[in-house]
Image (spheres, helix red, strand yellow):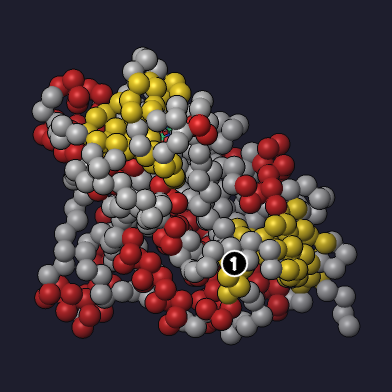
Amino acid sequence: MIGSGLAGLAAAVRFRKEGWDDFLVLERGHHVGGTWRDNTYPGAACDVPSHLYSYSFALNPNWTRSFSVQSEIQDYIIDVARRYKVYGKHVFGCEVLSARWIDGSARWELETSRGRFTADVLVGAFGALCEPSLPDIRGIDSFEGHVFHSSRWDGGVDLTDKRVAVIGTGASGIQIVPAIAGKVAELDVYQRTAAWILPRLDRRYSTPERLAHQYFPHYQRLLRGAIYWAHEAQAIGLAKYPRLMKPVELLARMKLRREVPDPALRRRLTPDYGIGCKRILISNNYYPAFLRDDVSLITSGISEIRENSIVTADGEVRETDAIVLATGFHVTDSPTYRRIHGKDGRSLGEVFDDVGRQCYKGTAIANFPNMFLLVGPNTGLGHNSMIYMIESQVNYVVDAIATMERGRIRSVEVREQAQEGFRKVLQRKLSRSVWNTGGCSSWYLDKHGANTTMWPDFSFEFRRITRRFDEDAYHISTEEPS
Ligand code: NAP
């Protein structure tokens, strides 16, 4: 397995439960946690409620808030890894440099920073939100102050009394801005596209509530179920009938009007696309940050970066000591794709360059036998917990491996016809979704313009189609009888 974020950890725990011991998790970092290990920026927190953003097999009665902060989630992940005794299956500081399918031996051969490995089955759990996307702005390399990406926060840099620029106003940017406003000398927020923002219904759990979570696990499950269904209902508007998103947009407009009295500023903070087209954000303190005299919203675009300043498209030179790049991730073009080579020697990256990120059930890809992706193409959600999708995929992968063991199967490779049929249905559904019709450009779309990121249906529908490994969709090669 490559990667030990939430997906890799879920699979490792399941493998253990199945009694499988012959597996390793190769992790380039030095700890479990993936994106939650990496994103330590001020204000980092989850926008899915705590009781839903946890594994179904390891509910956490100790959440202190209804929406957890990064450190609490990371502690939870470490606790799960310890409790389910999977640490020993990890090789940390092990970067996979290449993985090649060798047809003769029906095996994957991996070159890593810690030597060679071979595997009958490769599980790619390398995640979608892990490779920082750095903006290609003229002169950025000449900047003499501190510059770092939101997911590589440099805790050694003291920003107090510095003039700080935050570039990007997505889920990360809108958490960083209020967390550092007032703590830095001046804060410039560079917005390219405004985001739709809804209230964050976050609060501390009272002691009686926490006791109830601890001593009445059924109550906690009930709560989790209620949160799941409340979120699931949003798929109707996002994926099926975008016009149902209008009342939600109205709610966001009302919030903006209430929190930003200045009409000119409000206009600049108002998105020009339908709500939901880009990820809907939640925050109670982002808009109020702009009411401070030391926080400025810059919307004129960046023309270049100089040694000590950022120059805007309208010619203004803004002195800057530190730049935070909250500019997102390589999602549809992960560099790891270029390191995995299938049956014909071509890398996943080359295949995706040609035909787009086609994938069967977000998990299997033609020409890449015995390889399963977790959080693969079109498994993203705009409305519910990714952990639910991850657990669904893990069910599928476990059933695939169990089927291989039972049938003495050497290799399984998804049929191109099955993959193409799946793609067509998916793209038909996506064509009416708000992500495709909402009038925005987003990282959900790949370079061919196809939405290869989002799952355009209910999450329980994904669970249904991944419940069993469907052998019929695969070329099966059976071991020679010994
Ligand atoms: P993001 O949503 O991709 O946002 C990147 C921001 O940077 C956008 O505002 C984008 O503007 C801007 N940008 C990118 N390149 C730029 C450039 N060259 N010049 C100026 N602006 C530029 O990235 P993110 O905020 O890191 O979030 C990524 C995903 O991580 C989220 O969608 C979410 O799934 C997850 N996340 C979740 C949480 C949470 O649970 N609260 C927190 C953080 C992240 P455009 O919109 O114009 O492209």
Give x and y (percent) for residue 355: 68, 37
Image: 163 above or below 91: above
Seen at 71% across and 73% down, the residue is 404
Residue sitting nearer the eye, 223 or 20: 20
Residue 409 seen in this snapshot: yes
Q: Position of residue 364 (x, y in %)?
A: 64, 56
Which quadrant of the view contains residue 476? bottom right
- 120 w.r.t. 131: above or below: below
Observer able to see residue 384: no
Quadrant where the N terminus lies?
Answer: bottom right
In the image, 136 versus 388, the foreground residue is: 136
Q: Which residue is mark 1?
A: 93
429 in relation to 268, above or below:
below
Nearest the viewer among 429 and 84 is 84
Tell me what residue is drawn at x 38 percent, y 35 percent.
Answer: 167
Residue 375 % position (x, y): 52, 56
> Camera-side residue: 177 or 242?
177
Crowding around mark 1 (Cα neighbors within 10 Å: few <14, some 14 to 19, many 20+) is some
* Residue type at numbered disc 1: Gly
Q: Position of residue 164 (x, y in %)?
A: 32, 38
The reply, left or right, for residue 443 in relation to residue 204 is right
Q: Quadrant of residue 399?
A: bottom right
Which residue occupies 70% across, 52% down? 339
Relative to 287, residue 228 above or below? below
At mark 1, the secondary structure is loop
Q: Quadrant of ligand 1?
A: top left
Query: Which residue is rendered at x = 58% and y = 70% of the image?
Result: 92
